[in-house]
Amino acid sequence: MHLTDEEQRLLDGEGGPARRAAMQLLVRYGTVLGAERLVDTNNVAGGGVASLPNRRDVVADPMDMDATFALLSLDSDETFEIPPVKANTFKLIEGMDPRHWQIQGVSERTKAIVERSQSFCGKLGISKCNTCTPYQVGNVPVFGEHCAWMESSAVIYINSVLGARTNCEGAQSTGAASLVGKIPYWRLHTPEGRRATHHVRVEHRIDDMMDWGLLGYWLGETLDDAIPVLTGDLGPGELRKLKHFGAAAATSGGIEMYHLVGRTPEAPTLDAALGGRPAREELVFTDAQRREAYANLNSATEPTVDFIMLGCPHNSLEQVRLIVRLLEGRKVHADTALWIFTPGALRDVADRQGYTEILQKAGAMLMSDTCPALGRVKPEGARVAATDSCKQAHYLPATLGLQTHFGTVEDCVESAIAGRWVGRLR
């Protein structure tokens, strides 16, 4: 790998032991990937320091944040102080909601670890947005900007909808990138690596959120980590729908980018999206594929629903408003918990709008900073869940052992009121 003079100095230790460890990691990582060089980045979205329950158990003392960052974000057993970040860095999703941690069943020890992690991130200069959707709360990279982002649903969104450039990074590569402002230049950072590989013709009208999700889920199952370009009967794709669509495609497979002809910035035409090359394969999405994806997402055999989760990826304010309208003046069933997730910054706005109070009166909870699948949080005794999220429907059976129903947000709200699943594929 070719290094600039600045990069070589960092590798030699000129910037201190933590930045040296960061460069060592990025050089190893880039070499394995076949990257010939690094590229500058000033936009990192990562884990900060691990406080999620599925990661902190591997460290000797999760309250020692310098050692935790060194091990989990730099792959180093050395002991050294972590300096402030060099790149503009955003903290992704956390392990609990700071307002409702007790309702989520979070222990005092976990709460203490999360709070220590948050304080440590602040000291390093990491912005604590605590959401899987940084683009909803101020981090909106521009077209062509080189980024280093974790979180599959965020990666596919900024690559496809905004035209920013990032591969799906991990805790180590984003941790290292935050300290030195570098990331390996390969695949989706390169123009040729962003070209579509497969052409998908959509022959069943895609309009509502659920159908965008089902299309994405089928794409991921079918294409794994390819880059599809889509044409055909696609209705309007607002932020919330494309957020839902991309999250589903990145969950069932490894899709990190897609093109919609005439809509996404790198696909003015089908030929442009393909880079002048023929597609490796042409596929068709019809109602049969839609029904297959719906069946794959509905694992529950019991009609009773005791937990309903809305907001994965985290809900926009528009989505919260819709739920408020569906619930206002009504009551959630006494045996059912309805949890709605949104970024903390948007929950603050929802508080001022009066949305939080309306939801509370209906028996629902507006939460932030985490989600059931990543935070491992759920109502005590919950066995059967329902969600409008393909991602949560995919993960909840494995991560929390929940039977899961999948449907529209309207299906989920009506089921919350009835205490049983009332959704169906229309």
Image (cartoon, rainbow, N blue to C red):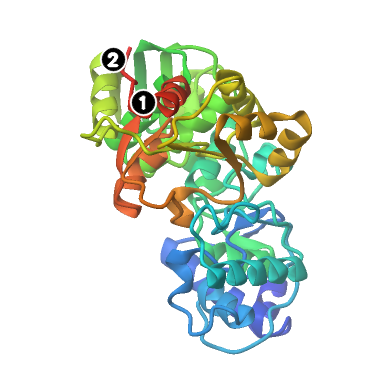
The tally of labels here is 2
Q: State the residue in front, 146 or 377.
A: 377
- The residue sitting at 53% across, 32% down in the picture is 243
Task: Specify the quadrant of the image occupied by residue 126.
Answer: bottom right
Tag 1 secondary structure: helix
Q: State the residue in front, 374 or 68.
A: 374
User: Is residue 94 something that shows in the picture?
Assistant: yes
Position in image of residue 135 (x %, y %): 66, 40
Mark 2: few/some/many CA within 10 Å (<14, 14-19, 20+): some
Residue type, label 1: Leu
- The residue sitting at 29% across, 36% down in the picture is 221
Q: Where is 211 relative to 304, above or below?
A: above
Would residue 125 appear left or right of 371 to someone viewing this image? right
Q: State the residue in front, 90 or 59.
A: 59
Q: Which residue is mark 2?
A: 286
Would residue 119 appear left or right of 192 to someone viewing this image? right
Would residue 220 appear left or right of 50 to someone viewing this image? left
First in sequence: mark 2 vs mark 1: 1
Contact? badges 2 and 1 (CB < 8 Å): no
Q: Which mark is residue 214?
A: 1
User: Is residue 278 something that shows in the picture?
Assistant: no
Mark 2–mark 1 distance (CA, rounded to whole Å): 11 Å
Q: State the residue in front, 300 or 259.
A: 300
Task: Specify the quadrant of the image occupied by residue 394.
Answer: top left
Position in image of residue 406 (x %, y %): 35, 30
Q: Where is 203 relative to 299, above or below?
A: above
- The residue sitting at 43% across, 77% down in the picture is 58
Residue type, label 2: Thr
Tag 2 secondary structure: loop
Position in image of residue 266 (x %, y %): 57, 28
Task: Specify the quadrant of the image occupied by residue 298.
Answer: top left
